[in-house]
Image (spheres, helix red, strand yellow):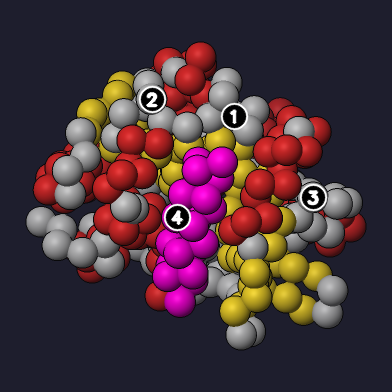
Amino acid sequence: MIETPMDVFRDFPVRKTKKQKQAFREAVQSYAEQLGYPCTVESGSLGSRNLVIGNPEQADYLVTAHYDTCARLPIPNFLTPCNFWPFLLWQVVLVLLILGVCILMGLGVGFLTGSGAIGSWCGYLMIWVILALMMIGPANPSNANDNTSGVVTLLEIAKSMPGNQRKKVCFVLFDLEEAGLIGSASYRKAHKSQTDRQMVLNLDCVGDGDYLTLFPTKELKKDRKRLTSLYKACGYFGKKSILVHEQGFSFYPSDQANFPWGVGICALNKRGKTLYLSRIHTKKDTILERTNVNLLRTALITYICRDAAQ
């Protein structure tokens, strides 16, 4: 039973197994229906289940977040979505670490068995085992930022959306984002005509950081009218800010990538000139700042209502 959006943090901290996901969806569906929204669960590829809150046929905006829980890793999924060289360096480091582990495993097996061929095959197999564990391995019970924060913020927006504006917005909780954006790809396929025109505001890892950053897709950057409208959500709020990142390198891997008018929204920290996202996929992912939730709730509702009125 969910009485407030933050109850998700307490009552449904892990959403990995079918049973956990079903219990979460049922609780959220009950909560949303009490708010007056129609709800449906849509089936997609590889067993994904997306929870749709509202009417996707008439909505001009989608507010989305993925609800599945990521796998726990020994090192964080460190991202620098606005800085190319740190981003590239970290990817190289990850590849070298994975290859190093696999090579050592292969050498060890080859030594013990006396067969280089067996060692090579074991090393090759280990690469696939590690990649599978990164996507669908044991759940990370610490997932306050990734992506309990997105779920909570989405529900806060749904709760606070003015009644006369609700028909303009549909809220979608995607499944299997961690396995490769599968839930959102299924939704896009099922609702192509609607999503060809809808703005998609995707909340992913919004709970930890002072720089709440909006990442428009390449298609959206080319549409100056749509892109300019996003600035209605921006502003400075003490030490925190909401900003659109449209210039220079930009790469934020999340569900908005499956939609032409998608906007990835995340919270970033800053060191020097580098904006970064850290701690996720590890036991250190324990921060969910209510201030971030409140700022995004107010900013996105204001943006949707003002933009819809024009």
The magenta span reads: 291-310
Q: Mark 2 or 1 closer to N-term?
A: 2
Nearest to the eye among marks 3 and 4: give it: 4
Nearest to the eye among marks 3 and 2: give it: 2
Quadrant of res 217 = top right
Q: Residue 208 appears at what percent x and percent y?
A: 53, 72
Q: CA distance from mark 3 to mark 1?
A: 17 Å
All told, the count of numbered labels is 4
Q: CA distance from mark 4 to mark 2?
A: 18 Å
Q: Is residue 194 above or below residue 92?
A: above
Within 10 Å of disc 3 (Cα), the crowding (few <14, some 14-19, many 20+) is some
Disc 3 residue type (three-letter): Glu
Disc 2 residue type (three-letter): Gln
Disc 1 residue type (three-letter): Phe
Q: Residue 146 appears at what percent x and percent y?
A: 47, 58
Give the labeled residue for mark 1: 259
Give the labeled residue for mark 2: 58
Within 10 Å of disc 1 (Cα), the crowding (few <14, some 14-19, many 20+) is many
Residue visible at 89% across and 57% down in the picture: 85
Q: Residue 233 appears at what percent x and percent y?
A: 59, 58
Q: CA distance from mark 3 to mark 2?
A: 29 Å
Nearest to the eye among marks 2 and 1: give it: 2
Can you tell which mark lies on residue 162?
none
Q: Residue 102 appears at what percent x and percent y?
A: 68, 45
Residue visible at 79% across and 50% down in the picture: 246
Furthest toward the front, the residue is 310
Q: Is residue 223 above or below residue 189?
A: below
Report helix, strand or loop for mark 4: helix
Report helix, strand or loop for mark 3: loop
Q: Quadrant of the N terminus?
A: bottom left
